[in-house]
Amino acid sequence: MSYIHGYDPDTLREQVDLRACKDRLDEIGEQRSLPALLERVWLLKVLGRLEDSLVLSEQSVRVARMAGTRKDLLRARILHASVLQFRGAYAAAEQELTSCAYEAEGKDWNSIAAFAYTHRGKVFYDAGDFVSARADFKRALFLRQESGASDDQLEAALLAIDAADRRRTGASVAS
């Protein structure tokens, strides 16, 4: 079940069913498997419980490092960086996402690389660097197309590119 109903066209944040997210968080409880940890991190993040999400995201990176695959570790690191972004720690998030994107691209893991570029684009977007955000969103779109992503994923990438274009144009008009 997808808890995401769309993306805010101005902030690019996920629009979620808060009640369903809370219910799912309760359902997962204290499960410690890596998939459960990652899901709990994301749910806590979208519910605005950033401190809890940060602690759990750090734990999920440790679990992935010890017991997961290299892909699992990249996914956990990307999610951790997205929590850092929500907390406003843009430099740390950008650094982590850059490392993840380059590693995934180097291994031809296009869908993971696209995930990293999308999130790095959102970091740039939140930081007001709309040119870099647009470049990352375009890179993510290309990688998603290469990996045969769903229409929803392609549409989300196009929405992000459009939002960066609008903000970039608005910023240049304001100056």
Image (cartoon, rainbow, N blue to C red):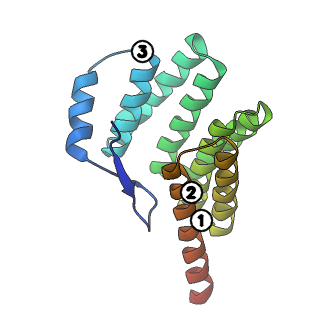
Relative vertical location of residue 163 with respect to residue 23 in this rendering, above or below: below
The disc, 3 or 2, on the residue closer to the chain's N-terminal end is: 3
Q: Which residue is mark 1?
A: 161
Q: Residue at x 43, y 66 (%)?
A: 9
What amino acid is labelled 2 in the image? Ala
Give the side of residue 31 with respect to residue 89, left or right: left
Q: Are marks 1 and 2 in contact (CB under 8 Å)?
A: yes
Q: Which mark is residue 33?
A: 3
Where residue 83 sits: x, y (%)?
47, 42
Q: Are marks 3 and 2 in contact (CB under 8 Å)?
A: no
What amino acid is labelled 3 in the image? Ser
Q: Secondary structure at mark 2?
A: helix
The disc, 1 or 3, on the residue closer to the chain's N-terminal end is: 3
Q: Nearer the viewer, mark 3 or mark 2?
A: 2
Relative vertical location of residue 38 with respect to residue 145 in this rendering, above or below: above
Q: Which residue is mark 2?
A: 157
Query: CA–CA distance between discs 1 and 3?
Result: 35 Å
Please indicate, yes or no, whether residue 29 appears anywhere in the rendered image. yes
